[in-house]
Structure formats: structure tokens, C-alpha cells
Image (tube, rainbow, N blue to C red):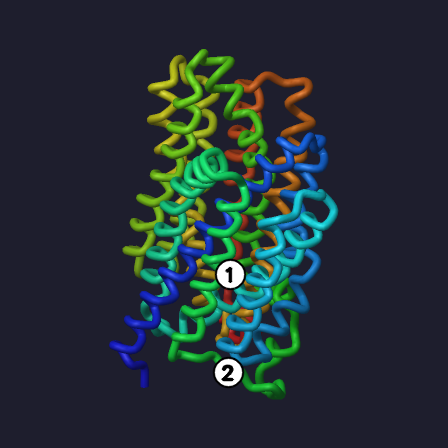
Amino acid sequence: MFNIERGRRDFVISLVGRAVSTFGDWVAVVALTLRLQADGAHPYEVALLLAAGTIPLLLLARPVGRLVDGHDSRRLLVSSGLVEVAAAIPLIFLHEVVPIVILVAVLGAAASVTGATWSALVPRIVGEDRIAQAISAQQSLSTLVLVAAPAVGGLLAGAFGSGVALAVDAGTFVVVTLAAALIRTRRVPERTPRADTPSDARSGFALVRADRVLAPLVAGVALVVLLVGMVDVVLVYLVRVTLDAGGVWFGVAQAAWMLGMVAGALGAGRIGAEGGRIRATVAGAGVACTGVVGMAVSPGVGILILVSVLGGVGNGYASACLSTLLMSRTPDSARGRVSAAANAIFGTAQGASLLFGGLVAIVLSPRAIYAVGGLLGLAATGVVAVASASRTSSPASPLDASTG
């Protein structure tokens, strides 16, 4: 039987541990970027650094999913945490691009294991009926961390040098490893697939494709991310050049979107029915795209901040509701694979979007990129709404029973 007190304790530990780890990761990204730039690295080398942390999400999605669903969660979390500590310590002292990129790739591989393991473990910790609230709390706290971490990373690197910031990152990996060791709830999957559960032998990608609810939502939201994510490349130019605002307003604009996401994620935790989460995912994506279009036509930075908050609220609703659907519609034995697959899909979409945005910025103005991205995102959201309504209104197939 689910133990409420133990679940509350374990959830608090996991929540704090993951937030600390996220904080350290972003402090390290800022510190390493500043270090490479100060050492005279070319822009493509900085891009390689950023890509090294995300490429493992795609390349290792299948083996990571099988690993998470086939082994004890505590052993995986502690082992991966120790790998992260071992990879982070040399980064404190290194300045050469190649070893830095290799170690960042190792960190990305270990993070792909810990991320999928935590995602699969949380439903065990909180109970099936509290998945939505748990994901809401986790995403809202992680978003708040993302507001502060880059600034702290810049301050630490500027005041004490990048080595101190990277030492902080290594320390956060120690904290999250200790948190994993303290978690009493364990996910110990059966090693041998059972004949009556065909999902046990399938990849996370196949499970998502086969689910009549998840398939259109995941594909559609990934498409929206691909189309809209490119605006991140030109936000600084929109604020500082187009709207002729100071650098501080660039930071405020970023923080406004993040704070909107916090509000959206918290609101998503109150949605109790699956149908409501499906509609909120689609509507949230549409609101986020509307916010992007609003930023394209904002006459001044004040209006831009307001519509940025609006877009962030939609983003928060869509992200938290879709994450809840991914876990609630997936059997416990397959949650590691589905989580790894989802991380790979959205991570790849975001990375490709940033590269695409850099190319588009050569020929389009910042306003035009925001307008094009937002309008294309709205069109994609409309397609998702139609596809989702069509598939969810059809009779459930036998496969759905095995996937959720």
C-alpha cells in the first residue's frame, strides 16, 4: 500500500535534489560559455559545447529507456550521479575545447539516465492519483531555478572565475546523488518481460506512436517547438535593437516568460481529468504561440513583457499537462522508455530549432522571425487540435489498453 508520509518525504527530497541539479547545470553552461569565449573560441565551438549536452538525449534514448526500465532506480541514480561528479571535477581546471566537449557529452549521457529514472520513479513516490500535482510542482520549481541560475552563473564567473562556478556545479551533483541515496521508494522492475504485456518489449518511441492520445500530442507539440523555438536566437536583438531597450530589459523579458511558465505549471496541477489535460495541452500551445505573435508586434518593451508572461503561461500549461499524460497513460514497466523517448523528441526539436533560427536570422528581421514562428506554430496547433480530437473520439484499440 502507498505510504503517504514516506511518499511526502521522498517527494520533497527528489524535488529539492532535482532543482539543485538543474541549478548547477545552468551555472555550468554559463561558466563554460564564458570560459570558451574568453579563451578565444570560435562561435561554432561554443555551439558544439551546447550541442554536446543534448545530443546524448537523442542517440541514447533507446538504450537509456531499456536501462531505466530494467534496473533498480536507486542504483541507477547513485551510479549516474557519481559519473556526473567524476566528469564535472576535471571541468573546473580544463580550458581545451575538445576535452571539455567530451566531458560535457558524458554529463549529457548521465543526465539522460537520471532524468528518465526520476520521471519514472515519481509516480511510485507520490501514487498514481497525484502524478499531475507532482509534475506541476516539479516543473514550476525547475522553471524558477532557470530564472536565477544563469544570472548566478554569470556573477560567480565574473567575480571569482569560471572555476568556482564549475565547482558549484560539481557540488550540486554530489547533493543530488546523496538525495537519490536517501530516497526510500525504489522502482525495481521485473527483469523478464511477461507475455501478457507486449509493451514490455517495445521501445518508448513505438509506445508513443501506438497511443491514440499521445501520438498526435507529442508529434504536434514537438512540431510547435521546432517552429517557435527559433525565436530564442533573436530575442536579444528584438529587445535591444528593434525596441531600443537596455540590456536589463532582455533579462526581464526572459524572466517574464519563465515566470509565466511557473503560473501555468501550477495551474495545470489543478486539472483532474484526462480530457481536460488534453485540451489544456493544445490550448496552452496555442496561447504560447499567440504570445510569440504578440511579441512580434509589440510597440514597446512594456507590452512585450506582458505578452511574454501570457506566452509563458500557455507554455507552462502545455508542458505540465503533456508530461502528466505521458506518465499517466504509460504502464509503470515502460515509463523509463517513454520518458527517454520524449526527452529525445523534444530535445532534438529544440536543438534543430535553434540551428534553424540562426540561419533564418540571416535573411529575416527579429520581428519577422517572431511573426513567422508564432503564426506557423498556431497553424501547427490547429492541426494538432483536429488530429487529437479525431483520434480521441475514435474507439480505443486493444493496444491502448497496454499503453495506458
Residue 367 position in % (x across, y down):
53, 18
Question: Which residue occupies 30% across, 60% down?
Answer: 272
> Around disc 1, counting alpha carbons within 10 Å, would you say few (fewer than 14), some (14 to 19), or many (20 or more)?
few
Q: Considering the numbered disc 2 on the image, is that residue within a helix, a strand or a loop?
A: loop
- Of badges 2 and 1, nearer the viewer stands 2
Q: Say above or below: 320 vs 38.
A: below
> Which residue lies under the disc numbered 1?
394
Q: Give the left or right position of residue 2, taking residue 46 as reference.
A: left
Q: Give the left or right position of residue 132, taking residue 372 as reference.
A: left
| Marks 2 and 1, the one that precedes in the sequence | 2
The N terminus lies in quadrant: bottom left
Residue 379 position in % (x across, y down):
54, 34
Q: How many marks?
A: 2
**Nearest to the observer: residue 186 or residue 378:** 186
Q: To which quarter of the image does residue 83 belong?
A: bottom right
Question: Which residue occupies 61% across, 66% down?
Answer: 204
Question: Which residue occupies 51% across, 72% down?
Answer: 78
Can residue 154 be seen in this snapshot?
yes
Q: CA distance from mark 2 to mark 1?
A: 35 Å
Q: Say above or below: 46 vs 299.
A: below
Amino acid type at circle 1 is Ser
Q: Say above or below: 76 vs 108.
A: below
Residue 195 position in % (x across, y down):
62, 88
> Which residue lies under the disc numbered 2?
188
Image disc number at residue 348 = none
> Around disc 2, counting alpha carbons within 10 Å, would you say few (fewer than 14), some (14 to 19), or many (20 or more)?
some
Q: Considering the numbered disc 1 on the image, is that residue within a helix, a strand or a loop?
A: loop
Residue 271 position in % (x across, y down):
31, 56
**Nearest to the observer: residue 23 or residue 372:** 23
Asked whether the residues under the numbered discs 2 and 1 touch, taking CB atoms below 8 Å apart as contact, a structural biologist would say no
Amino acid type at circle 2 is Val
